């Protein structure tokens, strides 16, 4: 049995072995090597000034600092749970910085780096993980939907949104597009496959950005696919590509190009950002139960931040003062996030009845009234 | 048998049934490494990859493949990680699995179990991971529904569900997984199986009947303790299964107490408690000294904030308050004198 020239499947029952390094015909687009060496790619020329690369470095460091602080807050009982983005900073910052102000992003629960790029204050993310709100930001204001935890659902929301853009005539030279984030595990959901089909046949202005971090909780990639994920796109009728997800420059370049194609009416692209979840699935998970430490060690050598730092230092674009400045800024941010988390108020009791429906509802109104009267029956102020 | 936690009881029941019948297979997300709620620990090691299948993240496929595997002669136990996610495979559950026996004129049986973590219980899982959804399944004839209130129930009802020749949806309560209790003495074969459709009287009392399911059984018991201090003796019934429903157990208790309070965790609108209340109104009208009262979750999406969740969930004080109300509203009954 052969499936394709990549030899992903050689014989019945042979595991796909997707943890092998990609074969010669599985091309991974890279513009910055793990050693910090700048390399060119004919299809993805990228002209960035030193300052622009330094800005990306700053984003990466700050986003990791938010993550580190949130994990600490969870460990100290201040957050109920946290889904770490450790290792995925470049995929998120690179793609997030490729978006225009009118583009719409649909995240999973792990897209803290994209949220940062969309201008969302990180403390808003913590509200969800502290359990004081389901995520109260205005998606339209930030062009960033609420976090979606039901795996894969958001791919259909994004597809429908992209079709809306199309119907509004906002496709063309100066068009808009949608981008949807999802994981390797999500590619097994019916929703995701249906989104691929719809986006394809309607030629919707959408980019499917899959962060293949190799794991879906405890399940390795080979439980989801026997071929490289980006290759699935061709079966649905649109281009797919694999990018080094730990290379912020390459992620920026491929996402820019795919978004522009979508905005101009050329339809969807699947981007598989090949990366690694360096932490636990969430703070409730213990990855040592199901994966080897050596795997993590290998990926640490491909750290998304270290390679940018190496590049900046070697080319002389950044000096020690710059690097220290970013670190100091990160510490300030960590402190601010912590403070805001500790000060978050619990919602008011009567908030239970808010926003169930747009207008009044007789049953709920009666229940609210009863409950308000009950709260009033306490003499002290503390009940309200 | 030893003391087991609720989650250990689930794993032990699975092990008991897998050892007894090699057609029993387990499938779901992350089940091989023990499950995200640690309810399948050790099973992959003991029974092998042929019988414990880690699946792709596709609930519709998990449910659909469980049906196909059952048609092929296996007795699949499929895990849907959070019961909320039945919404992502509802076609398979409601339109396919529930209807196979009926539509094939009884020629095809589906001896399968769907099981998953249900309910709120103050864990802050929010609107899409904390719902209590037994009543979703209860709208679909063809499915049986078990919802265990403690470790012994979790063990015995799951074992029975696996042996049953109809599809059974087992709702495990995620807030009870850590609860520990001694398993009851088992028969000479050393197996623990409880019949489906037999309620249990957890506490006897003469003044009022409290009916609970899953987590609300414990809440009813705590309310009964509080009321006992006031001289009110509440009888507490654990329904254990909604389909089949042991209405006779409820009615015979109400015939003695004359009062009924039903406590359900899901929103009140079309909750299962409405069915119990309707049956009591129709069958026990003459026995009732007071209106049947329901205590339920709020008619709102489940909030995520702990302070709000606590208000929406059924509480001891709300049940006790309902009982006091029922006693206050009671009319004298000729029969109970
Ligand atoms: C419909 C649905 N099924 C199962 C889950 C439980 N779950 C949460 S995260 C996850 C793994 C997702 O893996 P992947 O798509 O690779 O994303 P990653 O967590 O690696 O970012 C699972 C199975 C869920 N949230 N929603
Ligand atoms: Mg993943």
Image (cartoon, coloured by chain):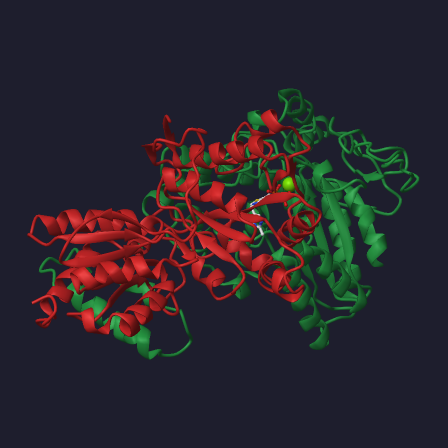
Chain colours: A green, B red
Outermost front residue: B188
Residue B80 % position (x, y): 55, 48
Residue A102 quadrant: bottom right
Left or right? Give the position of B121 relative to A190: left
- In depth, the one of A174 and B270 nearer the eye is B270
Relative to A110, does residue B38 appear above or below in the rendering? above
Kindly identify the residue that appears in the image at 23 percent across and 57 percent down: B210
Relative to B310, does residue A41 appear above or below in the rendering? above
Kindly identify the residue that appears in the image at 59 percent across and 39 percent down: A58
Residue B116 % position (x, y): 50, 47
Residue B91 % position (x, y): 62, 62
Relative to A248, does residue A256 appear above or below in the rendering? below
Residue A105 quadrant: bottom right
Residue B19 quadrant: top right
- In depth, the one of B306 and B318 nearer the eye is B318
Q: Quadrant of ligand 2?
A: top right
Kindly identify the residue that appears in the image at 48 percent across and 49 percent down: B170
């Amino acid at each position: 049995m052969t499936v394709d020239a990549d030899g992903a499947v050689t014989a019945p029952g042979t595991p796909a072995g997707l943890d092998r390094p990609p074969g010669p015909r599985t091309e991974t687009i890279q513009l910055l090597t793990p050693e910090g060496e700048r390399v060119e790619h004919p299809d993805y020329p990228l002209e960035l000034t030193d300052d622009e690369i330094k800005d990306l470095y700053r984003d990466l460091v700050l986003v990791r600092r938010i993550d580190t602080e949130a994990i600490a807050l969870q460990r100290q009982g201040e957050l109920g749970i946290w889904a770490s983005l450790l290792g995925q900073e470049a995929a998120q910052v690179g793609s997030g910085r490729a978006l225009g102000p009118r583009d719409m992003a649909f995240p999973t629960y792990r897209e803290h780096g994209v949220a940062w790029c969309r201008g969302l204050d990180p403390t808003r993310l913590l509200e969800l993980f502290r359990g004081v709100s389901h995520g109260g930001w205005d998606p339209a204001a930030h062009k960033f939907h609420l976090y979606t935890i039901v795996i894969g659902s958001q791919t259909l929301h994004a597809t429908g949104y992209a079709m809306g853009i199309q119907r509004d005539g906002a496709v063309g030279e100066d068009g808009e597009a949608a981008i949807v984030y999802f994981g390797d595990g999500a590619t097994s959901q019916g929703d995701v496959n249906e989104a691929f089909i719809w986006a394809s046949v309607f030629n919707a202005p959408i980019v499917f950005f899959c962060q293949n971090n190799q794991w879906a909780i405890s399940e390795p990639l080979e439980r989801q696919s026997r071929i490289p994920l980006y290759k699935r796109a061709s079966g649905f009728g649109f281009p797919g590509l694999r990018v080094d997800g730990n290379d912020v420059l390459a992620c920026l370049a491929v996402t820019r190009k795919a978004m522009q194609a979508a905005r101009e009416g050329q339809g969807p692209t699947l981007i598989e950002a090949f990366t690694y979840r360096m932490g636990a699935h969430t703070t409730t998970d213990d990855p040592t139960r199901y994966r080897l430490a050596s795997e993590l060690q290998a990926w640490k050598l491909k750290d998304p931040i270290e390679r940018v730092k190496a590049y900046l230092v070697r080319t002389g674009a950044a000096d020690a003062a710059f690097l220290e400045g970013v670190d100091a800024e990160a510490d300030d941010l960590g402190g601010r996030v912590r403070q805001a988390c500790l000060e978050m108020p619990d919602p008011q009791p009567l908030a239970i009845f808010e926003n169930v429906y747009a207008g009044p509802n007789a049953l709920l109104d009666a229940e609210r009234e009863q409950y308000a009267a009950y709260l009033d029956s306490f003499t002290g102020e503390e009940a309200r | 048998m030893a003391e087991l936690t609720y989650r250990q009881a689930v794993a032990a029941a699975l092990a008991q049934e897998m050892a007894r019948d090699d057609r029993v297979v387990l499938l779901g997300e992350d089940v091989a490494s023990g499950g995200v709620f640690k309810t399948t620990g050790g099973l992959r090691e003991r029974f092998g990859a042929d019988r414990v299948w880690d699946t792709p993240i596709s609930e519709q496929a998990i449910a659909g493949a469980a049906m196909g595997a059952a048609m092929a002669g296996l007795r699949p136990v499929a895990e849907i990680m959070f019961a909320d996610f039945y919404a992502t495979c509802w076609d398979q559950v409601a339109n396919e699995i529930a209807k196979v026996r009926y539509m094939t004129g009884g020629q095809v049986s589906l001896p399968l179990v769907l099981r998953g973590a249900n309910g709120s219980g103050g864990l802050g899982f929010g609107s899409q991971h904390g719902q209590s959804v037994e009543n979703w399944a209860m709208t679909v004839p063809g499915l049986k529904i078990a919802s265990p209130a403690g470790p012994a129930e979790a063990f015995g009802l799951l074992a029975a569900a696996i042996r049953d020749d109809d599809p059974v949806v087992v709702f495990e309560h995620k807030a009870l997984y850590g609860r520990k209790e001694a398993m009851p003495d088992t028969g000479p074969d050393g197996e623990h199986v409880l019949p489906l459709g037999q309620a249990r009287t957890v506490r006897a009392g003469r003044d009022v009947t409290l009916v609970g399911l899953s987590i609300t059984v414990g809440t009813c018991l705590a309310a009964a303790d509080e009321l006992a201090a006031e001289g009110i003796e509440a009888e507490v019934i654990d329904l254990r299964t909604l389909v089949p429903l042991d209405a006779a157990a409820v009615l015979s208790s109400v015939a003695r107490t004359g009062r009924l309070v039903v406590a359900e965790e899901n929103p009140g609108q079309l909750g299962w408690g409405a069915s119990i209340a309707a049956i009591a109104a129709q069958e026990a009208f003459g026995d009732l000294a007071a209106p049947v009262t329901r205590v339920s979750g709020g008619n709102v999406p489940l909030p995520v904030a702990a302070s709000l969740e606590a208000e929406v969930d059924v509480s001891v004080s709300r049940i006790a308050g309902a009982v006091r109300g029922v006693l206050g509203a009671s009319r004298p009954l000729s029969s109970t004198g």
